[in-house]
Structures are given as C-alpha cells and as structure tokens.
Amino acid sequence: MGMAQPKDQSVDMSVYRDDFPILNGQMNGKPLSYLDSASSAQKPRVVLDAIKTLYEGRYANIHRGLYQYSQETTTAFEAVRSKVAAFIDAPSSDEIIFTRNTTEAINLVAQSWAKANLKRGDEIILSEMEHHANIVPWQLLAKEIDFKIKVVPVTDEGKLSFGGFMSLIGEKTKLVSLVHVSNSLGTINRVDSFIDAVKSFNPDIKVLVDGSQSVVHHQVDVQEIGCDFFAFTGHKIYGPNGVGALWVRGDVLADMPPYQGGGDMIERVSFKDETTFKDGAARFEAGTPAIAEVIALGAAIDYVSDIGMDNIAAHEQVLLAQMTDGLHQIDGLKFYGTAPDKVGVVSFTADWAHISDIAMILDQCGVAVRTGHHCCMPLMERFGIDGTVRASLGLYSNSDDVQALLEGVKKAKEMLS
Ligand SMILES: Cc1ncc(COP(=O)(O)O)c(C=O)c1O
C-alpha cells in the first residue's frame, strides 16, 4: 500500500527528544506535553541550525548569480529536490515542485492540470474525509468549469467505503483526489487499492494523493501507490513552515500549463514574440522560493531518514496503544476513527463536557491538543458533531506525554461532570 510496516521495535527513541529544544519548556508552569503534531510538528536542532547556518554563512539568491555564494546556495537548494524525490521514491527529481505547502500544491494541480483538462459535465471524486485543502480548490474551480464533485462516504469506523468509491466511478470521471492518512481520525487509507481499481476502469483517470499526514508516519513510495500527483507539507515533517512539495508524474507534468507567472519560470520574455517557459518543475516555481526553508526541509528529511521511518512508526504505534487503552478506561468518551490501520492520532468527544472545556483544562495541565473540526467540516458533519479533541503523536512523544493527557482528561472529568 506504499507504506512499509514497522520492523525494528528495539530502537530507543527517547534519545531523539533532546533534539527538540522547545520540548524542554513549560506551558502554564507544567512540563510541556505536546500532542498536536498532526497540526504542526516541532523542529529538531538540525532544522533550526540549517536556517541559521545559511543566513549567517552562505545566503544568496539562487539560480541567478555566478558568484560562489549563489552557486553554493543553488546547489544546496537543488540537492533537496533529489532528497525529496528519494524520500517518496519519485522516479526523478525533475518531477518535484517546491510549493508553500500542501494547500498550494493542490491549488496548483487544480489551476494548472485540472483547468486545462476538465470541462463542463466531467466528474471528480473526493471523499468525506478530506481536509479543506483538498476540497475548496476543487469547489472554486467547479464554479468556473461546472464539473461535478462526487464524494466517497466514510464508514462508522472512519474508513473510506471501497464499495461507495466504486459506485462513483464512471465514464465522466476525470480525477480522483484522496487523503492518504486522515488528520482527524488517523485512518490509513489503502489508496493503492483505490488507485488500482480506478486505473483498471480507465488508466487515463488521474489520481492525486494528499500525503500531508502519511509521509510523517511511514515510508511512502509514490510509484508503488500508483498515483499521478502526491502532495505534502514541510512543517508536519519536522521542517519549517512555508515549504511543501508536489510530485507530478513526468508525462503528466510535461503537458501542464504554468500556474503562476514571474521570474525563474521562463525561458524568454518578450513583448514582441511569445513568452516561453521552462520545462518540468521549474515552470511552476515563479519568483524567489523559500530558499532557507527548502534547505531546512532537506535537513528534516535527512533527520527522519537517519532515524528510520519504520522506527518512528513502531514507536508511535506503542504510544498509540497506550493512549487508546488509557482513554478507553475513562467513562463517557466517544471515539472517532476506530479502524485498526491508523497512525498516532486519537479523536474523541465526551458526554460530560464540551470539547473546548476539556482542551482548556488540558492546557492548564501543560498538555497541547487540538480541538475543533480540524479543517474537516464535512467529516464532522458525517459524524453529526462540531468537532473532537484530537491528541496526535510525533517521533519525540513519550509515555510521560500520554500519561499527562490521561491525567488531564480525568481531571477534566472530575471538574466538568
Ligand atoms: C491531510 C491534510 N491535508 C492538507 C493539509 C494542509 O496543510 P497545509 O496547511 O500545510 O497546506 C493538512 C494540514 O493540517 C492536512 O492534515
């Protein structure tokens, strides 16, 4: 399914916690238990250092200068393209486009590939589980082009319904865009099976996979998955904000028109003749990119690769079991996302208090969790709720964090019920 299963359960992950300076801090006078990594991960020292080292040492704009600093910074920047390609097993680094984040990556596909290829009456398939980043760009475009958006239903345990998906595929289907791992529920979607099915029906149907949450928790292989577009965001994978990546399969990329115009994406600009554009990924990177952020994303990728995605996955599964078992022993909680294949995310509501009140008490206990709709309003609507309390793990999470959460929820129950 494009994600390797954990193999080495013996690695002591506690050694990595000290790499994250912020985790030694306190919140409301209590040791910080950061359980909001699905929203944004904390940054290891190597990532912070990569930014500082660049600005203090070798900073210059890229692709333009013939002087040493510019050339060295260009080399460092372009090296990250290869790192990203290797990280998700893309066939070529020329197929990696740097974006601001997943949101921009999906908007890019909508405004470039989809705008050029979809027409009135066509159909695209999304799911009830999508983040707004994989809904709203399509709704905006559908208003312009008048194609139809069909929606894969979610089962009670928080899985995409395969039967529901199959019933939506038809002659008019042009694109499928699905989330790999749900940020709200933690469910790992078997996107490879969905892609096999849709490509067997019609190999020309394109598939986008939103990998924002999957690259963080497991090894991803875009070729094994079989998609055409794969998007992820840097800040969830221990990298900085302001950088993400989009992989586009080479033959699809070759025909995509520019998305934004400006410097660096052109071959020749003229008022007399037609302006021409670069080939490949460069055509989609108009203007000065987030140079330091891209380089720091490279440091983050090296960091997690050195630890091993399998080790990270194994560690998170142990803590997930501890967190799930502990929360199940507290009366009155209802859980969303109970499918067995899931990453370190637990989402719940309580029949004894509103989610915001629980989160406020957790805050006082030094426990950072997310409450609300998690940018998945249609999913909340599906379950008939406004939102959940969501605790999510990172590679640095430990049993003390989980314990602090459990104690905090018990305290909230005592105070609020
Ligand atoms: C599944 C999923 N898709 C897309 C996004 C959007 O990421 P960004 O805000 O970095 O573009 C997120 C972030 O929460 C996410 O979890």
Image (cartoon, rainbow, N blue to C red):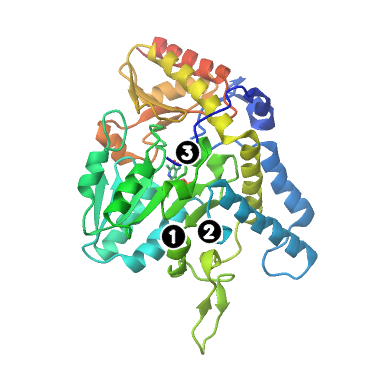
Q: Residue at x 35, y 27 (%)?
A: 339
350 shown above or below 257: above
Tell me which amino acid carries mark 1. Answer: Leu
The residue carrying mark 1 is: 108
Tell me which amino acid carries mark 2. Answer: Ile
Query: Which of the marked residues, 2 or 3, is nearer the chain's N terminus?
Result: 3
Percent from the top left, x then y, of residue 58?
77, 56
Q: Residue at x 64, y 34 (%)?
A: 307
Query: Which residue appears farthest toward the bottom when viewing the image?
Result: 272
Disc number at residue 3?
3
Q: Residue at x 48, y 37 (%)?
A: 39
122 shown above or below 163: below
The answer to whether mark 1 and mark 2 are in CB contact below 8 A is yes
Instruction: Specify the quadrant that holds the N terminus.
Output: top left
The answer to whether mark 2 and mark 3 are in CB contact below 8 A is no
Q: Is residue 104 left or right of residue 301?
A: left
* Badge 1 density bin: few <14, some 14–19, many ≥20, Cα 10 Å: many
Q: Residue at x 41, y 21 (%)?
A: 358
Q: Is residue 233 left or right of residue 72?
A: left
Which quadrant would residue 81 be assigned to in this image?
A: bottom right
Tell me which amino acid carries mark 3. Answer: Met
Query: Which of the marked residues, 1 or 2, is nearer the chain's N terminus?
Result: 2
